[in-house]
Structure formats: structure tokens, C-alpha cells
Amino acid sequence: MDTELKIARSRTQALIRAPFYGAVLMGLPSEKATGQTDTMATDGKRVLYESVFVDGLTEDELLFVNCHEALHVAFCHHLRRGERDAKLWNIATDYAINILLSDASIGHMPAGGLLNPDYRDMSAERIYDLLRQEQEQSGTSPEPCPWGEVTEPTNDDGSPLSAEQVEAMEADISQRIIAAADRVREAGGDLPNAISDLIEELMTPKVDWCDVLRRFAGGEQPDGVTYQRVNRKHFHHGRMIMPSIDRIGCGNIVVGIDSSASLSQSELTQFVSELNAVTEELSPESVTVIVCDTRVREVHHFGQGDIIDALDVKGRGGTRVAPVFEYIDEHGLDVDSFIYFTDLHVHDFPAPPSFPTLWVSTGKDDAPFGEVVKLD
């Protein structure tokens, strides 16, 4: 069969047997690869294919690979890599989506596909960090899937997309995903649970976690303004001398940091940097940082006006939060605001404490008590 006809038939089969995936594929032109891949790949704008690879697949295998590429796009894997290693990121994203297709019995996964039930319900970022930890411990790199790549999009001249272009691409994909889900629902079909969760996330209004952190730690109203300390943000960006917020203080802040392997160093760095900015602005009486994975690893105490430098976070084991709450009780810490930075893949929540709690989450968005804000 002609390769292009075989791909067209596969996309039609997707519309019939897996309508959501088929609807996503309809928005992705299929193009013959010219050296970019030896199998099939997507950059979020199209699906590239190599004829020899496609010709060697059964119809069920091609259906699986086509839906595999559709999920890469739906979850914006081509835009989420950041500074991560490209090879390991490809492996992590494959583990994240192949389990969804396997559970839904969509087609047949070709030989060499990456499938591990231990990664069910995990994000690609979480899987990546677990794979990286295993790689560091074993000294060996995991074998990649021999087909179905995801690559970062570029401009026609090969230059990387600007931040504005990335934002526009994300918005376009979100609209297409929501429209695809609407078509499935209108036809009386059901969406996979993972896709329903994705749609819910896309439809949820986004909030700036940094703003929530400031509100939670210091309240909505400043105590006043002062020219004794220049607003560094305005001075840096526009060389304008503007007053900064003058606060009497916001009490004692206690911070729990999840040092398990599921949180990346870049996420930890981002959180510590923002925490330092918040404490400089709000001038708390004290900040106590408790680092914990399965047990409390280290505790840092900062007084009013102290700078919270980049922390050398140790641990990288599993995730438990109860030891942090136990430490607070055992040491009688004064807590006016408690902030826990974690992915919320937690199974040992204690009873609700007497102090207000904010969970800054890189993963799940629900907790049995306190307020949850997602870090994107």
C-alpha cells in the first residue's frame, strides 16, 4: 500500500476507534521526513514520518504510533523540556503516554516501546527525575524507544522560537485540545481519564503562585511605603526610584521543602529564589526551612533581615511530609504561616494543624487541608 494512503487510513481509523486522538491528528499535517527522523516524530506542528518505518508497521501498530504522537502534542511535551537532557526527556515522555494508550487498548505497541506500570499517573517531569536518579545511581543510561520521537519546534531558518511564539503555540494547542474534546462529547463519546484531567486543567483559570505566596505569608495590605529602601524591581527595569513596601513584619514563617527525587533542581532553585524575595519584602520575624524526604534531613534558621541563599538540598529519597509536622511539634516552633514545597504525591498527611498551611505544588493540586497553588 502507498505510504501516504496507509497513514491516511490510520488517521481515519483513529477517528473511528479513538475519536479524541483522531481529532488531534487532524490538526497535525503529516509530512515525509527529510533526515529529521528515521521513524516518526512530532514537533507540535506536524507529524514527520519515514516511509521505510511506516511500511514495516501493521495497521494496529501504526494506529498506536499515530496516537502516541497525538499525545505528545496534547501534553505539550515539545515545549516542556526546558534545560532537561533531550534523550532522557524523550524516554520520560514515552513512559508517560504509552501507559495511557496501553490502558485504553488503542492499537498495538510496536517492538521496543517503553512501558512501565510503575509510572502510571505520573507526569513526564516526575518520571524524568526518577530516571535521572536511577541513572546517577547505576552509572548507566536507559535505552530510548526506537520510534516515536518528540522534538522542539523551530522557525523555518532553524532558530528557536521566541517566548511569544511559544506562548502562542501553547494557546493554539489548548484551543485545539478543548475543541477535540468537545467534538467527542457532542458525538456521545467518552474521554480517557487522563485527557479529562488535562481538559480540566486547561479550563481552570491560572493564578500566579508567587502572588499567592505573598498574600498567604503577608496578607493583602502593606503597612506602608518607604523611600529608605528603593524598589529594586522598578529600578532594575526602568531606573525609576520608587518606594518599596514597608512592613512591620509578618511573624514567623516555617517552610517545608520536599527533597525527594521527584522535584528537579531547577524547581527547587526557583522556589528558594522566590522565597528569598518574599522574605525580603515582607520582613518576617524568622524563617525556618525544614528539608525532608522520608525524614528531616536538615533545618535552617534565618532571622529578620537574613538572606536565604541557595540551599544545598540533601536527600533525594521518597516523599513523606509527616516528619516536618512532627519536628514543628517536638521543637515547639512558633508558626504564623506554614508553606510546604512539594509535588503532593503524599500518603502520610497528618491531622490538620492549628496554623495556616500553603502547599506550593509541582504535581497534584489537592490536599486534605490548607490551600494549594500550582507551580508551573
Image (cartoon, rainbow, N blue to C red):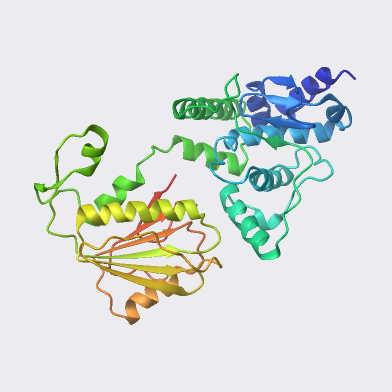
In x, y percent, where is residue 182?
A: 55, 27
Q: Is residue 365 above or below residue 58?
A: below
User: Hey, which residue is sitting farthest bottom in the picture?
Assistant: 330
The residue nearer to you, when weighing 298 against 361, is 298
The residue nearer to you, when weighing 200 against 220, is 220
Name which residue lies at 52% across and 36% down.
199
In x, y percent, where is residue 142?
A: 73, 53
Q: Is residue 200 above or below residue 292?
A: above
The reply, left or right, for residue 25 in relation to residue 6 is: left
Q: Is residue 255 above or below residue 94?
A: below
The reply, left or right, for residue 77 in relation to residue 299 is: right
In x, y percent, where is residue 30?
A: 72, 21
The reply, left or right, for residue 227 in relation to residue 10 is: left
Name which residue lies at 78% across and 45% down.
113
Q: Quadrant of residue 321?
A: bottom left
Quadrant where the N terminus lies?
top right
Work out whether residue 202 can be spotted: yes
Work out whether residue 362 can be spotted: no
The residue nearer to you, when weighing 208 against 117, is 208
Quadrant where the C terminus lies?
top left
Q: Quadrant of residue 338?
A: bottom left
